[in-house]
Amino acid sequence: MLGVGTRLATTSPELTAPGSSNLSISWREAYQLRWRRRRALWKSYRSRHHLRIVKDLTGKINPDDILAVSVLRNEITRLPFFLDHYRHLGVSQFLVVDNNSNDGSAEYLAAQPDVSVWHTAHSYHASRFGLDWLTWLQIKYAHGHWCLMVDADELLIYTGDDAHNLRKLTAWLDGRGQVGFGALMLDLYPKGPLDQCSYRPGQDPRNVMPWFDPSPYRVTRQAPLGNLWVQGGARARMFFGDNLQRAPTLNKIPLVKWNRRYAYVNSTHSMLPPQLNFLYDGPGGQTPSGILLHTKFLPEIVSKSAIEKQRQQHFHAPGNFDHYYDSLSAAPDLWHQGSVRLDNTAQLEDLGLMCAPDW
């Protein structure tokens, strides 16, 4: 694997270097991608029947509101800080699908003044890992809005976010004619066994999980979508060293000025139309980008891993990842001599993990 900061060749001679919007594909591939997008949108439209409204504040959405959409299950521990973080960044309303939580998450969300809540007991796996439900909400409510699609364990940061909230960032993007903002998902973890640290709801996860892997990260582009494929970091090192091809994909395009014709393909890792995938060129790239701090490794991950192994909802071939859940259930120590303590966004920029906007 290569370290960040290295400009990489693409995986196909048909694609240009990362960061370019010139995508050369055959007419047959273009036709297939067009129908793939239409099928995704149609599937999302049909999935509206899976959703039962719990609390609806969408009538209060203003034309210039920044929205956040999310699907979750049993995230009561994370929700207080998650909501406060994005409120502080400038999110006006949250559209949340609760996938049959039983820990009080739905009730907590319904009590919030800026959260609309839908409930579903349908399969997360069968809904393209929640994409069908969230895309339907984006089609209905987010057209023309800047919209974040983030999980409850993802916190977006970027250089200057203390002085430039999302409203200023999106105005800057609008001025460039840019319809999206990419980010690297960066795994945070504690020093010591995962079940030995202490966390209370509302606390900043960075206070108890301040460590990350600064490198290596492998960056390639894939045909025919032209989407990035970024792998590496703590999970690749700890759990997939014998088969790096199965390591999690870390590139995302979480912030997009939404159009009802757009569709995410695989979480927020890739999009259609394919030109949207060039909004982000990964770690070491020159396109302005941020970081999604991944707070998966709170102490509750140890008990949750056994539950998720049984549910079999989070991977395309869930049985292939039993070893992953078993390893997490053993409360491993992810820290190693190469770990770096998180300081600030300037540090992440210096490491080549993101690129600052030209404010």
Image (cartoon, rainbow, N blue to C red):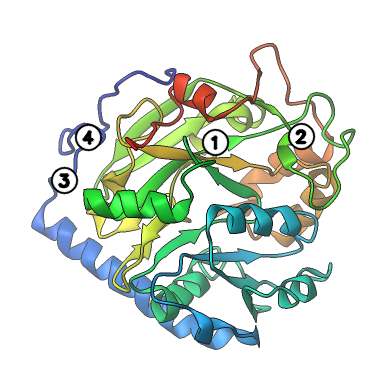
| Distance between the alpha carbons at the discs numbered 1 and 4 | 21 Å
Q: Earlier in the sequence, mark 1 or mark 3?
A: 3
Q: Earlier in the sequence, mark 3 or mark 2?
A: 3
Mark number displayed over residue 207 = 2
| Distance between the alpha carbons at the discs numbered 2 and 1 | 26 Å
| Badge 2 vs badge 4, beta-carbon distance below 8 Å | no
Instruction: Give the residue at x 65% y 50%.
Output: 153
Q: Which residue is mark 4?
A: 12
User: Which picture quadrant has residue 50?
Assistant: bottom right
Residue 318 spot, x, y in % from top left: 62, 53
Residue 267 spot, x, y in % from top left: 48, 56
Q: Earlier in the sequence, mark 2 or mark 4?
A: 4
Residue 185 spot, x, y in % from top left: 53, 40
Dot 2 alpha-carbon crowd within 10 angstroms: few under 14, some 14 to 19, many 20 or more: few
Depth check, mark 4 against mark 3: the one in front is: 3
Determine whether the residue tagged by mark 3 lies in a helix, strand or loop: loop
Q: Earlier in the sequence, mark 2 or mark 1?
A: 2
Viewer-nearest residue: 224 or 73 = 73
Q: Earlier in the sequence, mark 1 or mark 4?
A: 4
Depth check, mark 2 against mark 1: the one in front is: 2
Side of 29 relative to 120 (left or right): left
- As shown in the figure, which amino acid type bears the numbered disc 1? Ala
Q: Which residue is mark 3?
A: 23
Q: Which residue is mark 1?
A: 247
- As shown in the figure, which amino acid type bears the numbered disc 2? Asn
